Amino acid sequence: MMTMPRRSAKLQDSMSYPPRAMRADRAAAYLDMSRSKFLELVALQRLPKPKIIDGIRVWDRLALDAAFEDFPLQREDGTIAERRNTFDDVLRES
């Protein structure tokens, strides 16, 4: 009798998926900062709070992306440029 190899319960395919939910360590690495700095910015409400899934604290990648867009830019001369509110531009054109 020929036995078939057991398949892992975890889905495996050839596609690569970016994580939608990340724990603090991975979320901090995603934003290229230390875990302590990441949690500090969360406490200061400059980054989003986590979602809780069965007691596990995870950060939504899309919420992190949106929060990241709100941080100011540094100009070539080293000064800080506030992020332009593009919605204000839309309202001015109306």
Image: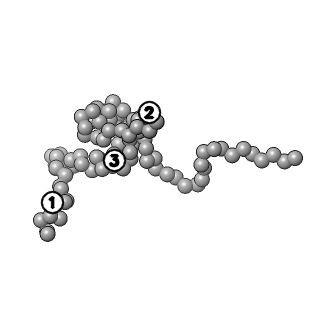
| Colour convention | one colour
User: In the structure shown, which secondary structural element does the residue marked by tag 2 occupy?
Assistant: loop
> What element does badge 1 sit on?
helix
Q: Which mark is residue 55?
A: 2
Q: Is residue 76 above or below residue 27?
A: below
Looking at the image, tell me whether mark 2 or mark 1 is earlier in sequence order. Answer: 2
Separation of disc 2 and disc 1 at Cα? Answer: 40 Å
Q: Determine whether, in the image, residue 6 is placed left or right of residue 62.
A: right
C-alpha span from label 2 to label 3: 19 Å
State yes or no: discs 2 and 1 in contact (Cβ < 8 Å).
Answer: no
Give the residue at x 35% y 42%. 31
Graded by Cα atoms within 10 Å as few (under 14), some (14 to 19) or many (20 or more), the crowding at tag 1 reads few
Mark 2 or 3: in front is 2
Q: Position of residue 93 (x, y in %)?
A: 14, 68
Instruction: Classify mark 2: residues with Cα within 10 Å, few (<14), some (14-19) or many (20+).
Output: few
Q: Residue furthest bottom?
A: 94
Residue sitting at the far right: 1
Q: Which residue is more in the foreground, 11 or 33?
A: 11
Q: Which residue is mark 1?
A: 88
- What residue sits right under mark 3 in the picture? 63
Q: From the viewer's perspective, is 18 left or right of 85?
A: right
Q: Residue at x 60, y 49 (%)?
A: 12
Q: x%, y% of residue 9?
A: 63, 44
Q: Amino acid at mark 3?
A: Ala
Q: Is residue 85 visible?
A: yes
Residue 23 visible at all: no
- Give, as a three-letter code, the residue at label 1: Asp
In this view, the residue farthest toward the front is: 54
Image vertical order of residue 44 relative to residue 16, above or below: above
